[in-house]
Image: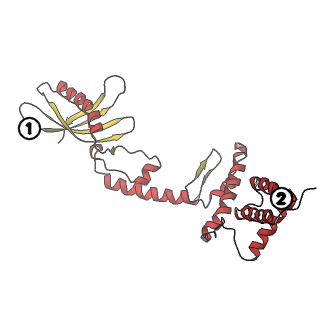
């Protein structure tokens, strides 16, 4: 029969139990081992019970375990948002497991009030949430404004479209590119190819490339380049060339002329 614990062992047992509760847990394996070694009379179940009793008495006295600081009050909006997010996640998981042909418009109602624009389209229906409908109205207004401001501009003088339009993949005739050293080096061969083409078509001309002024670009690597060149009989002349950059083979010069 194991001997009862001494006063010192009992005190140490009490401290370990309290430390277990202060750690925010009822039972810790390492603590159990320590207590079982200190106090052979105390079994696993009684330890767990004592931990629970200590925690309850602590909370009844209005005390909180040391390691568990008072939680910061969360804004009411955030408290409501968490269960709503869980609901949406659950519904989204159920949606993924549903057969494509069985999908209906109502299946996407969970996205109605989502802050992010969402759209789903199939041959049977198109779903857009409120954020997407609002975004489309903003895009429509921004597009109309951009068209009005750029209606008299050539592709060589194109202005930057609003960011909201570019985000949704709207492609314009041309967009301006910020000039950097790397871009300048990339454009020089295109300018020289355009200038060679111009000199060949105008036998009296013998222009030599000077520098790139600016450029705009549109998909399929078409550049609208404004650059300067000079021949023996005049000062610097401004050219405008439309060139398609080719990764393999010579670049394709669409047009090249002196800027009027």
Q: Can you identify the residue that label 1 sits on?
A: 235
- The quadrant in which the N terminus is found is bottom right
Task: Looking at the image, tell me whether mark 1 or mark 2 is earlier in sequence order.
Answer: 2
Work out whether residue 20 or residue 238 is closer to the camera in this orientation and state it: 20
Judged left or right of residue 3, residue 115 is left
Query: Does the image show residue 57?
Result: yes
Judged left or right of residue 121, residue 96 is right
Q: Residues within 10 Å of mark 2 (few under 14, many from 20)?
A: some
Toward the left, the furthest residue is: 233
- The quadrant in which the C terminus is found is top left
The mark found on residue 39 in the picture is: 2
Toward the top, the furthest residue is: 249
**Between tags 1 and 2, which lies in front?**
2
Instruction: Find residue 172 and report its image quarter.
Output: top left
Residue 256 location (% of width, % of height): 23, 33
**Label 1 SS:** loop
């Amino acid at each position: 029969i194991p001997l009862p614990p001494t006063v010192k062992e009992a005190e140490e047992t009490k401290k370990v139990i309290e430390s277990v509760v202060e750690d925010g847990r009822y039972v810790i394996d390492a603590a159990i081992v320590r207590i079982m070694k200190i106090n052979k009379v105390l079994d696993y179940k009684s330890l767990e019970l004592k931990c629970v009793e200590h925690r309850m008495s602590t909370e009844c006295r209005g005390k909180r375990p040391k390691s568990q600081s008072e939680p910061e009050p969360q804004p009411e909006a955030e408290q409501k948002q968490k269960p709503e997010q869980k609901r949406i996640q659950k519904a989204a998981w159920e949606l993924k497991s549903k057969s494509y042909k069985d999908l209906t418009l109502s299946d996407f109602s969970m996205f109605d009030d989502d802050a992010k624009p969402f759209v789903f389209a199939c041959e049977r229906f198109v779903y857009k949430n409120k954020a997407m409908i609002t975004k489309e109205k903003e895009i429509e207004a921004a597009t109309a404004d951009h068209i009005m401001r750029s209606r008299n501009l050539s592709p060589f003088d194109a202005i930057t479209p609003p960011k909201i339009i570019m985000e949704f993949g709207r492609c314009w005739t041309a967009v301006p590119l910020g000039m950097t050293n790397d871009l300048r080096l990339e454009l020089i061969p295109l300018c020289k190819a355009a200038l060679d083409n111009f000199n060949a078509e105008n036998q009296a001309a013998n222009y030599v490339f000077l520098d790139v002024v600016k450029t705009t670009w549109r998909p399929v690597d078409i550049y609208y380049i404004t650059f300067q060149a000079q021949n023996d009989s005049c000062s610097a002349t401004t050219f405008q060339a439309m060139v398609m950059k080719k990764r393999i083979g010579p670049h394709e010069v669409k047009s090249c002329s002196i800027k009027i």
